[in-house]
Amino acid sequence: MKPDLSVHIGNLKFRNPILLASGTVGYGNEMSEFIDLNTIGGIVTKSLSLKPRKGNPPQRIVETPAGMLNAIGLQNVGVEEFIREKIPFLEKFDVPLICNIAASTYEEYIECTRILTKEETIKAFEINVSCPNVKEGGLQFGNDVKAVGKITSGVKAVTDKPVIIKLSPNVSYISEFAKVVNEEGGDAVSAINTLVGTSFNINTRKPKIYNVNGGLSGPAIKPIALAKVLEIKQKVDIPVIGIGGIMNWRDVIEFMIVGSSAVQLGTVNFIDPTAAAKIIKGIEDYCLKQGIERISELTGSYII
Amino acid sequence: MFITKVPVKEIIELENHIFIIKLFSPEIASIIQPGEFLNVKVVDSNYPLLRRPFSVCDVEGDLICLMFNILGEGTKRLASRNIGDYIDVLGPLGNGFNLDGNFDIAIIVAGGLGVAPFPYFIKKIKNSKEIFSFIGGKTDKDIITYGMNNITVSTDDGSAGTKGNVVELLELNIKQFESKQIKIFGCGPNVMLRKLKEFSLTHNIDCEVSTECAMACGFGICQGCPIESTHHPEKYLLVCKNGPVFNIKDVVL
């Protein structure tokens, strides 16, 4: 019998736990050339702000051992163009669309959500309070428990759709942030966003990235992400979407065991845009082999 | 666009640590155009993690040839692959050179490894256009002539050809093309491209250049390779998707 791969976050059902992470799937159109989006669990859009953002000048990317640093700077088309130009493409697919919002001020988070919640195609929001690459907003909020609580309750007040808060790993105790999200009515947290890192050219003594610091992603951060998911799972009763260096189906299973209800694929999409399809097949085979009827049984099934 | 594993058929080391790797891929070879590129996963492991972009250097029947030098871990691994090894390639990607259009003479201006896209370019147009190649490098060791024709050389230190940069070399030679329909095709370091832009605007000569930028995906999702647009300063173009070949008037270099 085919295993049931579906999972739930709040009242939202995904056909499988494999979501594509914000900033690694654009607005869907490029990825759709490689993969049937209708087979994916869900898509998280590139971070949107109220107005378009130009992003950082080059160089934006540098490779590091088993990882990469990026400082894109939240380049995006803005809410208005997203609704006008991107939603008509995305609404053709039968895949839950999670809209990621990144703002510079509390008011901007609320305003973006208020406008976007009217769009039927958008099924949930992921609030980015943890981008390390912009001067205002981003980490400034992500490091502040009170600010994260205020943004959570503020966004919840203007939408009926599930609200997921994307947490920063650049804090001492990530579970404190998950706790406040839970208390303020947030439906889930996604963990983790990228880790702050940098890289210098030893000949010029200059940073390789224009922004100096970037966000570290890729398999290099997987053990950290797993530990953060586990910490949240052990301390707070809130669904976790695990993110951080997933490259294959084994990584997904590991993330679910430590407590993830679903996962997001990020950096791997840049290397293999067909990775999601292979991973979905891989987790299905794993369930068959292990006699697991529902993949959701794996969530938090660790034995310590 | 294909994402596929293709076998290595040949690796040649030219002089001065420049390599040509030939990959067997009839499906890509039959559609790729000069100036387009492949994003290559040099090994199947997590180190190096990302693909490496290489513009197509030449096509020989079913073989795609890529030119590279050893710059870091990725190119080191690529150079040490064996014949028969399979390499994961993604492509063709990007927009190549516009070979049609109103010109009788193609002037190639290349700095160092900037010659890479031109052997295939020359192969495609040599029956219909006249071609002149101006090739520059820091020293004679940086001059690559693989697959080029009608070559004039400059070096910064004068160890080969005319002393000076390649755009100065072009300036010295431009008179012979007066009253002819010419178009410049350039590739090389940014400092060269900036000088080339100044030159082509001053002389009012149509010019296309192949640009370079660190990138991850190569097809537009990572947004890692911005290049400033001349006409729309409020948003960046992407080297991978809008380029890598641009009309030199359209980008800020």
Image (spheres, coloured by chain):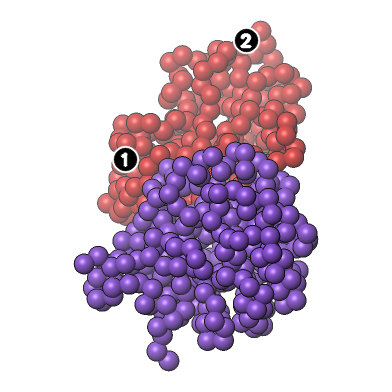
Q: Residues within 10 Å of mark 1 (few under 14, many from 20)?
A: some
Q: Amino acid at mark 1?
A: Ser
Query: Can residue A31 be seen in this snapshot?
Result: yes
What residue does disc 1 label?
Answer: B25
Quarter holding the N terminus of chain B is top left
Q: Which of marks 2 and 1 precedes in the sequence?
A: 1
Could you say which is closer to the camera, residue A12 or residue A92?
A12
Q: Is A66 located above or below residue B248 in the figure?
A: below
**Quadrant position of residue B28:** top left
Q: Residue at x 61, y 57 (%)?
A: A100
Q: Position of residue B161 (x, y in %)?
A: 62, 32
Can you tell which chain is drawn purple?
A
Tell me the residue that label 2 is attached to: B180
What chain letter is assigned to the residue under label 2?
Answer: B
Residue B124 screen position, x and y as percent: 43, 23
Residue at 40% over, 50% down: A38
Label 1: chain letter: B
**Type of the residue with mark 2:** Lys
Label 2 neighbour load within 10 Å: few <14, some 14-19, many 20+: few
- Chain seen in red: B
Q: Nearer the viewer, mark 1 or mark 2?
A: 1
